[in-house]
Image (tube, rainbow, N blue to C red):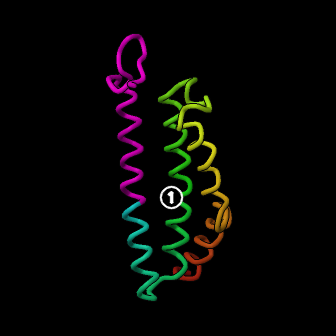
Amino acid sequence: SVTRQGGRPIGEFQLVQAMLAESHAEMYASRAMVLEAARAYDSGEDRRLAPSSAKLFCSEMVGRVADRAVQIHGGMGYMRHVPVERFYRDVRLFRIYEGTSEIQKLIVGRQLLREHA
């Protein structure tokens, strides 16, 4: 079933379209970043900066995407029977699992100073 607001499908609203576009662009950039980090890691060229940068960016990105998804769904985004609610809860793990965003920032910062100091 299509979510409606004021009798119109929410996808017709320009702000919803803008949020979808932002999420899509961030996911597209994240995919490119992960593929480049994997290539650099596999080649032995970069086993620290690119993977940590990708982990940091993607973990934060998925949080922003989840926030937008809840925003798009309004109050229904918090209801347990709506899949967005579970997605919103689960994405928090991306910022914690395999090194918190704060740890990734430290790794990236230190590596940048080593390479460019």
* The stretch drawn in magenta includes residue 15: yes
Q: Observer-nearest residue: 51 or 84?
A: 84
Q: Image quarter for residue 6?
A: top left
Q: Which residue is mark 1?
A: 58
* On-image quarter of the C terminus: bottom right
Q: Position of residue 29 (x, y in %)?
A: 38, 57
The segment highlighted magenta reads 1-30
Q: What residue is shown at x 56% (from left), y 30% (from top)?
A: 77
Q: Is residue 97 left or right of residue 39?
A: right
Q: Is residue 99 left or right of residue 84?
A: right
Which residue type carries mark 1? Cys
Q: What residue is shown at x 44% (from left), y 73% (from top)?
A: 37
Residue at the bottom extreme, as displayed: 44
Q: Position of residue 5 (x, y in %)?
A: 43, 16
* The stretch drawn in magenta includes residue 85: no
* On-image quarter of the N terminus: top left
On screen, residue 9 above or below 46: above
Q: What residue is shown at x 59% (from left), y 41% (from top)?
A: 86
